[in-house]
Image: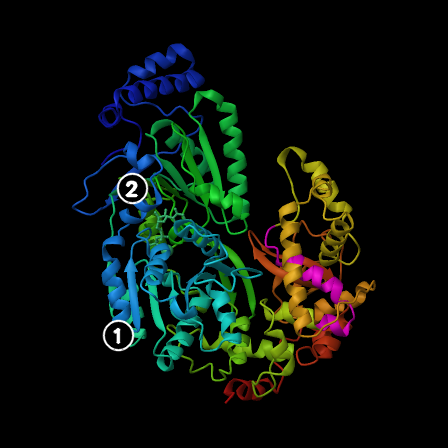
Amino acid sequence: EMDFQYEETDEKERMPNSEQRKWEEDQMSFAQLRFGAKDAAKKKKTKEYEIILDDQIEFIQDHAMPGNQKEKEERLTETQKKKISIEETKKSLPIFPFKQDLINAVREHQVLIIEGETGSGKTTQIPQYLKHAGFTDDNMKIGCTQPRRVAAMSVAARVAEELGVKLGNEVGYSIRFEDCTSERTQIKYMTDGMLLREFLGEPDLQSYSVMIIDEAHERTLHTDVLFGLIKDIARFRKNLKLLISSATLDAQKFSEFFDDAPIFRIPGRRYPVDIYYTKAPEADYIDACVVTILQIHVTQPLGDILVFLTGQEEIEVCNEILTDRCRRLGSQIRELVILPIYSNLPSDMQAKIFEPTPPGARKVVLATNIAETSLTIDNIIYVIDPGFCKENSYNARTGMESLIVTPISKASANQRAGRAGRVAAGKCFRLYTAWAYKHELEDTQRPEIQRVNLGNVVLLLKSLGINDLINFDFLDPPPHETLVLALEQLYALGALNHLGELTKLGRRMAEFPVDPMMGKMILASEKYKCSDEILSIAAMLSVNSSVFYRPKDKIIHADTARKNFFVPGGDHLTLLNIYKQWTQSGYSDQWCYENFIQKRSMKRARDVREQIEGLMQRVEIDIVSNDDTAQIRKAITAGYFYHTAKLSENGQYKTVKHHQQVMIHPNSSLFEDLCRWLIYHELVFTTKEYMRQTIEIESSWLLEVAPHYYKAKDLEDAKSKKMPKQRGKARDELVGGN
Ligand code: CDP
Ligand code: MG
């Protein structure tokens, strides 16, 4: 067993002399930083360096993930480091030698399962091979789905570059609220959710000759639903080729689901990765990340670092601390290029992670799960894995849905580690103990379909004329309770009638690529004559990242600016106020800057608003404006009446139907008010269950907008937990469908 702590002899062998000398100088200056020159000299003579950073984490090597026997352990060579031409890169990909075999297999079989390690070239190369083989002749398209927006965008950009065409022409992408394709598009990357929506307009996918369901192993909700739909289509459209592509493991399962479709395996190329665990659990994993990054930077040979965090906020915090520490260390350390990547990051920033690292510098990529399998960043040698991800969780009994930071699965941990061994032998530092890995991590993650609200998908399937959801061909069926609850919710929203059939309202709701509650809110704005305001609110709510900018050194100013936007009634109205003022400023960047507002979020809101506006016109809702905030709040209530909380005697909020305790988010404009009735946009679980984006309502509105759901006695003070008498019977009819 080897300790991670730096051993001189070991590294010497790997380094050319000049590097070595530079290295020792660096070590020296570091030591000076902490111990002063004299002590440093003394330290330098000892065989094992003490790591020179203020705090450090001790790692223990546990095991190595084996690479292929054929591949010798290598370090990055100069040629690997310098930017090689696109042609060379394409030829170097593991999939390249199989180009013709693959084309033949696609010609021969209608459905093909493709299995190959991440980075082998599946996503970027297969559509190009098939285009080359003539599958885009006669105006036919090759489609390729991705679970993540960022992947769809960045892969499309890469393929456009490889083919030397402008993105959006022959090669394009389509993600929610953004369509970057044209009449000429032959290769179309899209999120799995967008393909689902395409079924509404083109139920047999007639314009496609090939559909690739990529990253199938991710098992997102939309991908799982696509499996069932596409299997059905393939049966009557014999000329549609179907490729299910996945990184590992599940190929057999996919094959069985698609009537024993053949599996095409692309042999991987992988170098060994040494796995290190912390000796003790780390309480603060962000801090542990920062320390480990610096530790690697100071003690390990060049090679880029990939860090897995759970979301934008964490990435920003980590970025900030790391930048600050680097600044303080100044020229004592080599250049460290810090690059964030998450789904809301603007595309120009996203592209940066693929740029080559400047000579002598080290790149550290702070990523969400997106870098686990969807995106391949070259030259990663070190992976830092805190062991967490953000996961949807859904309680089918209460209908409460929230995003929770949870431990990853063993399968994920191994995928993450594997990212370090693509170009050379690598190292993976897990910020948890070996014991935790063995005993606390599940083997695999549950498919999303089993842990989210299905309202959206059920509405879509109903719009496609699929009425019998209980017998739909799911790869893994969702829990019965979840399906039933989705049906009940859609019934209460008025999207389904008591027989479970789509209503006119439901059909209109399905036009909007938003969840049914928001769809209902948008449609209700017609009745309450406030479509203009609701449009802005819907757009602002759809911008996932915060619109507020809160730099560390100006927190007080930023918070004051934020509070200046507060208006009576709650957060939705505050968001509306911000949007209105920004519009009045002429969409000014300067205005954003002065008011501590993220201009990028605002621009995105504006794009989203335009998209929704177009859809509103399609369902023939006039855009009219209304100053009466009660009307606006009623429209919101008409969509979100499930999300009602009530103040109880002890001064705490409880959800109305299930009496679950929830708190107002400290950032809310209502945080210091006591409102009797609240509607919240979403729940976020951190240390407690927090309601994010809340407005104050009157209880009588609930009876007005949701007479199927609320009865007067629900809204009395008595804590009746009894089910309505008729519910059992009504439920049978609803679920029975056809
Ligand atoms: O899909 P799979 O994981 O098998 O591989 P891929 O995404 O097609 O990646 C193949 C190669 O394209 C990798 O070397 C990536 O680094 C490169 N690539 C890139 O340079 N820029 C992108 N935006 C996407 C991929
Ligand atoms: Mg891929």
Q: Which disc is residue 52 wearing?
A: none
The foreground one among 489 and 302 is 302
Q: Main secondary structure of the magenta part?
A: helix
Locate ligand 2 by image quadrant: bottom left
Q: Looking at the image, which residue is at 55% across and 72% down? A: 455
Q: Earlier in the sequence, mark 2 or mark 1?
A: 1
Please name the residue that numbered disc 2 is placed on: 423
Q: Is residue 643 visible?
A: no
Asked if the beta carbon under badge 1 is closer than 8 A to the nearest atom of ligand 1, the reply is: no
Query: What's the residue type where badge 1 is placed?
Result: Asp
Residue 539 lies within the magenta run? yes
Q: Looking at the image, which residue is at 26% across and 74% down? A: 260
Q: Residue furthest front?
A: 138
Q: Quadrant of residue 212?
A: bottom left
Q: 43 left or right of 523?
A: left
Q: 394 left or right of 718?
A: left
Residue 323 lies within the magenta run? no
Q: Which disc is residue 260 wearing?
A: 1
Task: Determine the secondary structure under disc 2.
Answer: loop
The foreground one among 137 and 85 is 137
Instruction: Read off the magenta span.
Output: 524-545
Q: Position of residue 566 (x, y in %)?
A: 76, 50
Task: Determine the secondary structure under disc 1.
Answer: loop
Q: Looking at the image, which residue is at 22% across and 26% down? A: 13
